[in-house]
Image: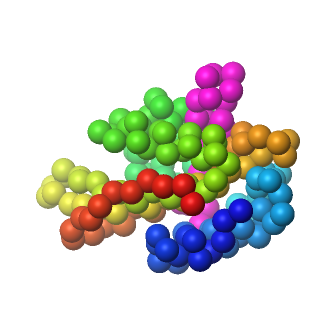
Amino acid sequence: MINRQAIEEWTSNSQILEFADYAIRVWDDNKYIPFREFNLMDVASLASNAFVIDVAPEDGRRLLFRYTGTKVDQQYGQNLMGQYLEDVYTGTDRETVINSIKDVTASGRVGYMRKFIVYQDAATSYRLVERISFPCSTDGTSVDRIVGTIFFTPIVETDENIAILL
């Protein structure tokens, strides 16, 4: 199981740390986070940046958005609920992004991603994207849900992209 200190080695984002603190409390001594005990309203201030993914084995372990907060939907320009990540994510790092979520499913470990993206709108701008993903289970034996939070922060300059298991 993960602890806060391991996450703090990679991020100082207070909202990610708040979400992680809650997830770790719910995780307790279980093999994975019991999905039925994870209540986004317990961290309601972060719900707009949260997501819940259903790992759909009947679809070859595809990643179905069951919930996406309003800030996640705004970033994508559409409501993602009911859509597959593989169908909506079109970035040049598509394989890395999708595999980083699948790695959480396969390993049962927490995933953290930090990447920098360029937006070409009125002027070129950059955003730091930070995401943390936690393995959840509805049956206690396998990871069939992922809960997480993602933040898109405007920045001036970029740094190295990372995608790791914690």
Quadrant in the picture for residue 159: bottom left
Residue 143 image offset from top left, x and y in percent: 72, 42
Q: Which stretch is magenta? A: 46-67
Quadrant in the picture for residue 38: bottom right
Query: Taking the image as drawn, is residue 81 in sight?
Result: no
**Depth order, front residue of 108/16:** 108
Residue 137 image offset from top left, x and y in percent: 77, 46
Query: Taking the image as drawn, is residue 10 in sight?
Result: yes
Q: In the figure, is residue 153 to the left or right of 125?
A: right
Residue 7 image offset from top left, x and y in percent: 55, 70
**Magenta stretch: residue 147 in it?**
no
**Magenta stretch: residue 47 in it?**
yes
Numbered-mark total: 0
Q: What residue is rendered at 47% in x and 39% in y?
A: 98
- Asked if 142 appears above or below 131 in the picture, the reply is above
The quadrant the C terminus occupies is bottom right
Q: What residue is rendered at 62% in x and 74% in y?
A: 4
Q: What residue is rendered at 29% in x and 39% in y?
A: 92
- Asked if 24 appears above or below 74 in the picture, the reply is below
